[in-house]
Amino acid sequence: MGERDFDVAIVGAGFAGMYLLHRLRGLGLSARVIEAGPGVGGTWYWNRYPGARCDVESLQYSYQFDDALQQEWDWSERYATQAEILEYAEHVADRYDLRRDIEFESRVTSAHYDEAESLWTLEADDGGKTVARFCVMATGCLSVPNWPNIEGLESFAGPTYHTALWPDRKIDFTGKRVAVIGTGSSAIQAIPLIAREAARLFVFQRTPNYTIPARNAPLDPDRVKDIKANYGAMRARAKTSLVGIAGDYNLGSALEAAPEDRQAEYERRWLQGGVTFMGAYGDLMLEKDANETAANFVRGKIREVVEDPALAETLCPDNIIGGKRLCVDTDYFATYNRDNVTLIDVKGRPIEAITAGAVRAHGRDFEIDVLIIATGFDAMTGALNNIDIRGRGDACLRERWADGPSSYLGLAMADFPNLFTVTGPGSPSVFTNMIPSIEQHVDWITDCLGYMKARNYTAIEAEGDAEKGWWDHVQEVAAQGLKATTDSWYLGANVAGKPRVFMPYYGGFPAYCQKCEQVAADGYEGFAFA
């Protein structure tokens, strides 16, 4: 393939890459999107496992940049399935004629900066080269599957599936003996559906998770009509929320509430369903004693649902609630009452090996026909570290981040001119409603490029002091709450050998947006132009 010149090269055709392409066209800039997959949608293209759906309500997990798009698209359920979200992404690609500027099935392997020419050259695994003034990594926070380091994993003779790389076809588990390794969000969604088909299902659990019932249902047409008539007001409310989701948030203290009132509030939110359960009180993620009231409530629900008391205790997490991403489910705990489902606790006694036909644990072989790996992602940095990114003076991002990432606002890094990241480390990203967070980042980047175009600037770079100052702030804010006290993928704790650094910004969506706006208003303070 030949070499192509553009103003902007974009890596990834998920919701970030698509919106960025649309905005750049409006600026009159030429752009090319390079996408590893055969279609648009990013994480929603690959994550096709049974039960895959969003944990943010569909009416909010959507673009807001065009009200005509908001009005014309109709979601069918409270929480959209993967298939429906992918259909929405494809509709957006068609509606704005985006595919003509996207190169599919081309995985970027390197991105190198030429300081003399102020140009980036991107090379892909198919031999293609793209040269551009600017490079934007829209590679997603959850896009690189994490594979467990288990002896003999590759020796299993039957089909092996990773939830984050699910085939584009229906997998029939009827009559099969199935093992699921992992009990994070993907497994919690998939396990109840697999259990209904499989002859036997063995679930290997290292760390039990908190999960709240989704209470998913078809959307009420009257509610949809009301929201569409007042979409702007709902979006405005969302922007004032710490997580970027309009919802029912109580800033009061769990510890100051009367026990019976507190119990009633938790019960109300449990019946309501969804992740806004944690909005019951403002101190749940600040005070351990407050958090324990919510954690004990959920443990009580697990004990009510799971009929075997010993099994219920194994399913009860012993850490804080909300330290890891809170899951939502449909019949997850009830699934363990089925005769064909067995839970194997491997926290204290890890899986010993995988053989051609079994998972070996606790000194016995659990014979299986199908192996499912549900161990999540190398989050936030995995996709960027998989690309050989080299900036000024041959600075290597992978080496720079060897002890943990740092970034200025999750948008840019010193020594990497004209390189932007969408929802990178140091931004609220995974603590928020992702699509509005993506839109905020894309708008900031495109506004910045417009600013440069108007002034004939050819290069922009984060200043080292600004990057360090922001990253120190990210760590300080994380230390003020309870999030950093739990081993989670927010700290890279799920990936063997990954440095333990708190990656997302925990100061809330409104404070972050205000900081970004202030930086731009002050002539892009913390950035140097050439």
Image (spheres, grey):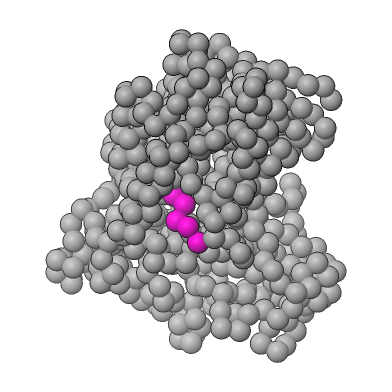
Is 157 situated left or right of 381 in this image?
Answer: right
Note whether 50 is above or below 158 in the view shown: above
Q: Is residue 502 magenta?
A: yes
| Residue 224 shows in the view | yes
Q: Is 105 colored magenta in this rendering?
A: no
Residue 417: percent from left, percent from top: 55, 29
Residue 267 vertical placement versus 250 (above, below): below
Q: Residue at x 52, y 73 (%)?
A: 207
Q: Position of residue 325 (x, y in %)?
A: 45, 58
Q: Nearer the viewer, residue 204 or 58?
A: 204
Taking depth in this image into account, of 242 and 53 the one nearest to the observer is 242
Which quadrant of the figure has residue 223?
top left
Q: Nearer the viewer, residue 465 or 217?
A: 465
Residue at (34%, 39%) from the top-left corner?
512
Specify the quadrant that holds the N terminus: top right
How far from the left and from the top, in percent, is residue 369? 79, 71
At 18% across and 72% down in the image, what residue appears?
259
Say if residue 229 shows up in the picture: no
Q: Quadrant of residue 111?
A: top right
Give the side of residue 222 with respect to residue 374, left or right.
left
Main SS of residues in magenta: loop
Point 39% across, 66% down: residue: 485
> Residue 484's spot in the image, x, y percent?
39, 62
Q: Nearer the viewer, residue 166 or 115?
A: 115
Number of marks: 0
Q: State which region is magenta.
A: 500-505
